Image: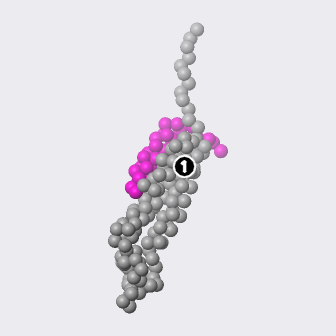
């Protein structure tokens, strides 16, 4: 009786390589955009809590002079746009889009749920989105190269 070699481990993806690469590209773009916005949120928080200042564009100062762009003490301006709030709102919605891209890539790759959580943390820990993007993108390409036959054919 002869022994047969064990069958090689196979991996199944939930989409085609093209769908997975597309999801990885969207994730990559949103990871960079969310990371940049998170750094701007950090600048805004340092200005607000460290120097009691807001980032403001336009408007009038309390002494009647006009402002174009700058860090102004909180409550000393009227009119204009409070860019501090704009940065917070844009980052919040961008993070939602980042989570959707994360979910799509995670579900196509059929990774464990803990992987989804670690990728999601990239949008709330400064600089982590850049690190995670490089790591995740490399893993996606490596797994697609390792298991070329694993993707579903539609």
| In the foreground, 112 or 4 | 112
Quadrant of the rendered image containing residue 82: bottom left
Residue 55 in sight: no
Could one spot residue 37 in this view of the protein?
yes
State the extent of the magenta-drawn residues as a range.
126-154
The location of residue 74, given as percent across then percent down, is 40, 77
Quarter of the image with the C terminus in it: top right
As helix, strand or loop, the secondary structure at mark 1 comes to: helix
Q: Main secondary structure of the magenta part?
A: helix
Any magenta on residue 86?
Answer: no
Residue 21 x, y percent position in the rendering: 52, 49
Asked whether, in this view, residue 110 is left or right of residue 39, the answer is: right
Task: Let me know if residue 130 is in the magenta part.
Answer: yes
Q: Which residue: 54% across, 59% down?
A: 96
For image coordinates 47% across by 56% down, the residue present is 123
| Residue at the outermost top position | 1
Residue 36 picture location, percent across and down: 41, 62
User: How many tags in the picture?
Assistant: 1
Residue occupying the point 54% across, 49% down: 105
Q: Residue furthest left?
A: 51
Q: Residue at x 49, y 58 (%)?
A: 30
9 or 33: nearer the eye? 33
Answer above or below: position of 103 versus 49: above
Please state, as top left, top right, bottom left or bottom right, where the N terminus lies in the image.
top right
Look at the picture and state if 14 lies above or below 97: above
As rendered, which of 73 and 66 lies closer to the eye?
A: 73
Foreground residue among 8 and 53: 53
Above or below, 86 relative to 26 = below
Q: Which residue is mark 1?
A: 105
Disc 1 packing (10 Å; few <14; some 14–19; many ≥20) = many
Q: Quadrant of residue 17?
A: top right
């Amino acid at each position: 009786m002869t022994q047969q070699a064990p069958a090689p481990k196979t991996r199944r993806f939930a989409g085609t390589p093209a769908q997975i690469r597309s999801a990885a590209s969207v994730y990559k773009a949103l990871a960079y955009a969310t990371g940049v916005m998170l750094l701007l949120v950090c600048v805004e928080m340092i200005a607000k809590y460290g120097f009691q200042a807001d980032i403001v564009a336009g408007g009038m100062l309390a002494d009647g002079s006009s402002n174009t762009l700058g860090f102004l003490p909180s409550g000393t301006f009227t009119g204009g746009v409070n860019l501090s709030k704009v940065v917070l709102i844009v980052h919040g919605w961008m993070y939602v889009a980042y989570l959707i891209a994360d979910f799509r890539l995670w579900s196509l790759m059929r990774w464990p749920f803990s992987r989804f959580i670690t990728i999601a943390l990239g949008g709330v820990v400064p600089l982590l989105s850049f690190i995670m993007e490089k790591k995740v993108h490399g893993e996606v390409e490596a797994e697609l190269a390792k298991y070329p036959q694993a993707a579903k054919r539609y």
